[in-house]
Structures are given as structure tokens and as C-alpha cells.
Amino acid sequence: MATILDIHIKGNKRKGVMIMTKKNLTLIGFTLFFFLIAIPAYSGILDGKTFSGKNGEIGKSGSEDDEIKFENGKFLSIGCAKYGFGDADYTSKVDGDRVFFTADIYSDKYGRITYSGFVKGNDLNGTFIWFDKGKYDKPEQVKWWKGSAKK
């Protein structure tokens, strides 16, 4: 069954007619449904933010300076980039006043580093676990990371 909707253009009734079939309504409904599902999955909520800070082994004071950037849905550690770790997609989720994130970055030579943490206001707190290439059953290092937004 088709429903006819009148379109009023500059006061002229029935200047145009649009026919809405069940097929068209179903197609519009599916399109809206998938669009709404994709919005919460968008990983770029932290895009444009850069954090500068220190990291160190768990239980010890900070030993290394680093900078973390979020751009175009990607996560990048400047400190790890010098070892061949590239940028990678990150996921994020808002919970109250914090934005939680995770990212896995890779190096052909040094393996994988898994970052996880949260941003609250202008501060980033997190941890990262480095798995040496080919030794993914036991982490090589577990470190903390703490920094503030760069202005």
C-alpha cells in the first residue's frame, strides 16, 4: 500500500507528489538504525588532544618523557614511535566525567604495546603493556603513564 504525501511549494498545493512505499520506509528505517549504531562506536572522541607527561615501571617514579596524540581516530605515542611503533585506531567510551580509551600499537621489530587509560578534564592516566615480538604469552614491561593536555 502506498501513501501519498502532498508537498507544499510556495503555496502551491500538489506541485510535487512523493510516494512512500513500505519498501522505501523500510530502507529509511534501516539506514537510520545503522547510522545511530555507528555514532557510539566512533573512536574519535579524543581527537585533537595531545598529552605530555612521564611514564615509568609500576611502583617506580617516572623515568621517561612522552607525548600522546589522538588524531583522526588514531592514537600515537611519540616516545614509542622512535622504536618503530606506529599510530593505531583507538576505542573510547564516556563514563561520567571520564573518557576511557584503549589502543594497540605495533612495531615490526619490537612487537605490540597495549595502552589503556582514561582522560579526566585535562589529565590522562593509564598503563601500557609491552609484548616483545613473538613472546606474547608474557609481557616484557608493564608501565604507568601520566600527563596533562598540551596547550
Image: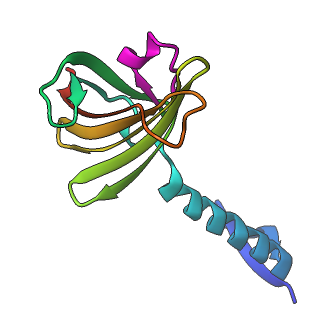
Residue drawn at (52%, 14%) of the image: 84
| Residue 8, placed above or below residue 101 | below
Which residue appears farthest toward the bottom when viewing the image?
Answer: 1
- Horizontal arrangement in the rendering, residue 69 relative to residue 132 (left or right): left
The percent coordinates of residue 98 (x first, y second) are 24, 52
Query: Of 94 and 57, which appears nearest the observer?
Result: 57
Residue drawn at (33%, 50%) of the image: 100
The image quarter containing residue 121 is top left
Query: Of 110 and 76, which appears nearest the observer?
Result: 110
- Horizontal arrangement in the rendering, residue 16 relative to residue 121 (left or right): right
Q: What is the magenta range?
A: 75-87
Instruction: State whether residue 21 appears in this view.
Output: no
The percent coordinates of residue 150 (x first, y second) are 22, 21
Give the quadrant of the C terminus: top left
| Residue 25, placed above or below residue 34 | below
Give the quadrant of the N terminus: bottom right
Residue drawn at (37%, 29%) of the image: 48
- Horizontal arrangement in the rendering, residue 94 relative to residue 71 (left or right): left
Residue drawn at (71%, 70%) of the image: 30
Query: Of 7 and 130, which appears nearest the observer?
Result: 130
